Amino acid sequence: MKLAQYISHLLYRYQCVTVPEFGSFLTETHSARLHPSSRTFYPPKKTVSFNALLKKNDGLLVHHISQYLQIPYDDAIKLIQEEVSLWKKTL
């Protein structure tokens, strides 16, 4: 399963996506700005950070995967747990 793909999709719409038992990806939006002296324009951007302390399942990712794959909620949780297990082994 491509869990990173689902996380990426959700980060476009939400500021926080929690991967149960792993951590949360957080986004921060920065507005466009103009540097007056150099006349340089900086477009808007979004930065992503990670917080390993926010591990509790908020249901957003699980629900998204459940709907996208058309599987029961509990099956989506199992798929995520398997992927997280692989991530932890890799790390």
Image (tube, rainbow, N blue to C red):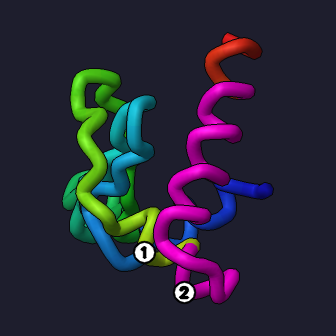
The quadrant of the image that shows the C terminus is top right
Identify the secondary structure beneath mark 2: helix
Relative to 62, 54 lies left or right: left
Q: Which numbered tag is attached to residue 67?
A: 2
Q: Which x, y percent locates residue 82?
A: 68, 39
Q: Which numbered tag is attached to residue 63?
A: 1
Question: Where, by quadrant of the figure, is residue 70 drawn?
Answer: bottom right
Magenta residues, dominant SS class: helix
Q: Which numbered tag is attached to residue 20?
A: none
Mark 1: few/some/many CA within 10 Å (<14, 14-19, 20+)? some
Which residue type carries mark 1? His
Which residue is rendered at x = 36% and y = 78% of the image? 13
Relative to 32, is 57 above or below? above
Tell me, yes or no, if residue 73 can be seen here: yes
Which residue is rendered at x = 48% and y = 71% of the image? 73
Identify the secondary structure beneath mark 1: helix
Question: Where, by quadrant of the figure, is residue 53 drawn?
Answer: top left
Q: Which x, y percent locates residue 3?
A: 66, 54
Which residue is rendered at x = 29% and y = 34% of the image? 55
Q: Is residue 79 magenta?
A: yes
In terms of depth relative to the viewer, which is nearer, 42 or 70?
A: 70
Mark 2: few/some/many CA within 10 Å (<14, 14-19, 20+)? few
Q: Is residue 71 magenta?
A: yes
Q: Which x, y percent locates residue 33?
A: 24, 65
Which span is picked out in magenta?
Answer: 66-86
Which residue type carries mark 2? Gln
In terms of depth relative to the viewer, which is nearer, 23 or 66?
A: 66
Relative to 91, is 10 above or below? below
In terms of depth relative to the viewer, which is nearer, 26 or 18?
A: 18
Relative to 27, 67 lies left or right: right
